[in-house]
């Protein structure tokens, strides 16, 4: 009896071995071939293909449905599996040393086969993820169309079924109708509504340029959803899906680029309402930065959707960026200098500044340099990195502009006339509408070699250099008219030759009084007057 049981078990084991032998699973290539070969349209054997699923993880689930959905996921996503590139080594291991092979690691990292004992099966994670991936590739119940559309006709014409031609025609009609509806919505309804509200220019310049890429974006999105349902030949589907996946971020980038223009115009209008002119310069720079950012992000998305490994690309860019940074230190310094100028705002457009030997009016602040128009009407371009390290004297931020001069009058001017003249000068300052009344100094303060000196120290409340010159001229004319009216003579450098004695004439040398007479006159002066 014992020998009979042993022989029976041996026969069952043999039968199972033969059954598994029909599904070759001894290497990654054999397993993938078994999976693909038994799910072809002319050789549809899902029960055989289901043997590639790990038997330890298929209890209680519909194996044939899972394996069919897995094939539909790969076909719908346009995954082209090159059988010749699949390893045929029974002991194959990946870069991490695991007995694991990914069918397409970039698009679907959850789909892979792994070795268990001597056989290769689709992994537990793959089995668990198939329904989720199937829902992602065929959203909104579009997977049900795959059961309806084939009933429209299964006859083949040039490699495609009748139902596929009909479906393609229906899809084209849907895309055209959507394009027409969106065009009508933007070009007529939306445009007319804005035009009637008085915003016709805004609609024409900003809304319509966004409408076309938006319409194309919607159409591409619909195609990405519905094309997998058509189950087109895998080679054509592979490249067509790649094209659609690249067009989606392309049109999205174009639309975002146009939106940046709209945002830039809005910010320019807001900047024009402020008193400072620096934000008028910042907005175009910010607009440029946003456009560059949109282009870079869009380019990376396009590469990612074309199934390039952008992780390696970004790593290469990082290394290249480090080398570039070392080679372009001055450029980076100028860039950060630009940021310091833009955020610290040491000056704004139109300010008169002095920085070292540079003296002029700021015309433009760029990313790399600042342009200053000198008073010789030449244009100086100063690297922002250098300008950020310099002491910048901003004359444009002065609240008051100083006017300081010395008025020289002749020595023969009597004291009472000097007093009247200084009072008149103060009156000129008080009456002028653009002088600072709370702070000025006008005093007879020096007796120089050839003149009596009056200090004229005032401040003008004017914003620009041109106005400063204008009102300084007005003050000088008023001073000259006052002097002419009072009979004041302005002094200039002179020398007097004094001859002490002439023959036959008395000496010109003064005769000084004695000490007693001098003391009396001094007491009389301070007793009868109160000199200030």
Image (tube, grey):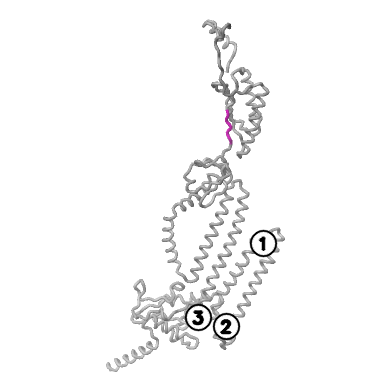
Find numbered disc 3 in the image and state the secondary structure of the residue it sits on: helix
Q: Residue at x 52, y 78 (%)?
A: 237
Identify the image quadrant of the N terminus: bottom left
Q: Residue at x 45, y 69 (%)?
A: 309
Kindly report which numbered mark, 1 or 2, lies closer to the viewer in this rendering.
1
Mark 1 neighbour class, 10 Å CA radius: few under 14, some 14 to 19, many 20 or more: some
Find numbered disc 2 in the image and state the secondary structure of the residue it sits on: helix
Magenta stretch contains residue 307: no
Tell me the magenta residue range: 400-405
The residue singled out by tag 1 in the image is 204
Give the image location of residue 343, x and y in percent: 52, 48
Identify the image quadrant of the C terminus: top right
Q: CA distance from mark 3 to mark 2?
A: 14 Å
The image quarter containing residue 396 is top right
Please report whichever mark, 1 or 3, sits nearer to the chain's N-terminal start.
1
Q: Which mark is on residue 234?
A: 3
As displayed, is residue 234 above or below residue 5?
above
């Amino acid at each position: 009896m014992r020998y009979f049981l042993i022989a029976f078990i041996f026969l069952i084991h043999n039968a199972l071995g033969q059954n598994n032998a029909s599904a070759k699973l001894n290497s990654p290539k054999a397993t993938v071939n078994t999976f693909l070969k038994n799910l072809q349209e002319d050789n549809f054997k899902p029960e055989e293909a289901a043997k590639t699923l790990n038997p330890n993880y298929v209890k209680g689930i519909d194996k044939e449905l899972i394996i069919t959905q897995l094939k539909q996921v790969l076909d719908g996503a346009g995954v082209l599996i090159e059988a010749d590139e699949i390893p045929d080594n029974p002991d194959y291991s990946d870069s991490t040393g695991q007995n694991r092979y990914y069918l397409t690691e970039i698009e679907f990292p959850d789909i892979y086969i792994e070795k268990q004992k001597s056989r290769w099966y689709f992994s537990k994670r793959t089995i668990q993820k198939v329904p989720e991936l199937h829902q992602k590739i065929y959203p909104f119940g579009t997977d049900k169309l795959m059961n309806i559309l084939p009933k429209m006709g299964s006859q083949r014409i040039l490699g495609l079924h009748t139902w596929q031609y009909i479906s393609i025609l229906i899809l084209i009609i849907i895309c055209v109708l959507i394009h027409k509806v969106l065009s009508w919505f933007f070009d007529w309804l939306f445009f007319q509504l804005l035009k009637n509200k008085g915003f016709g220019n805004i609609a024409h310049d900003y809304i319509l340029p966004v409408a076309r890429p938006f319409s194309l974006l919607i159409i591409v999105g619909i195609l990405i959803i519905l094309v997998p349902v058509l189950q087109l030949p895998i080679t054509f589907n592979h490249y067509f899906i790649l094209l659609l996946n690249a067009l989606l971020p392309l049109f999205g980038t174009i639309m975002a680029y146009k939106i940046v223009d709209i945002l830039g115009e809005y910010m320019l209008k807001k900047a024009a309402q402020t008193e400072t002119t620096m934000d008028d310069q910042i907005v175009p720079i910010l607009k440029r930065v946003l456009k560059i950012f949109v282009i870079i992000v869009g380019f990376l998305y396009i590469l990612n959707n074309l199934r390039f490994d952008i992780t390696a690309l970004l790593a290469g860019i990082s290394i290249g960026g480090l080398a570039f940074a070392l080679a372009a230190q001055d450029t980076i310094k100028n860039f950060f200098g630009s940021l310091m100028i833009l955020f610290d705002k040491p000056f704004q457009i139109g300010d008169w500044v002095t920085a070292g030997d540079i003296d002029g009016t700021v015309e433009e602040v760029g990313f790399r340099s600042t342009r200053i128009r000198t008073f010789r009407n030449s244009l100086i371009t100063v690297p922002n990195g250098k300008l950020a390290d310099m002491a910048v004297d901003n004359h444009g931020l002065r609240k008051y502009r100083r006017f300081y001069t010395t008025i020289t009058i002749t020595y023969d001017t009597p004291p009472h006339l000097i007093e009247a003249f200084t009072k008149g000068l103060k009156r000129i300052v008080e009456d002028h509408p653009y002088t600072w009344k709370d702070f000025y100094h006008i005093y007879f303060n020096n007796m120089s070699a050839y003149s009596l000196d009056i200090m004229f120290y005032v401040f003008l409340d004017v914003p620009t250099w041109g106005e400063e010159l204008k009102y300084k001229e007005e003050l000088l004319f008023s001073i000259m008219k006052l002097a002419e009216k009072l009979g004041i003579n302005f002094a200039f450098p002179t020398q007097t030759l004094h001859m002490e004695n002439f023959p036959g004439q008395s000496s010109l040398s003064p005769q000084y009084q004695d000490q007693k007479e001098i003391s009396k006159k001094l007491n009389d002066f301070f007793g009868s007057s109160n000199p200030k």
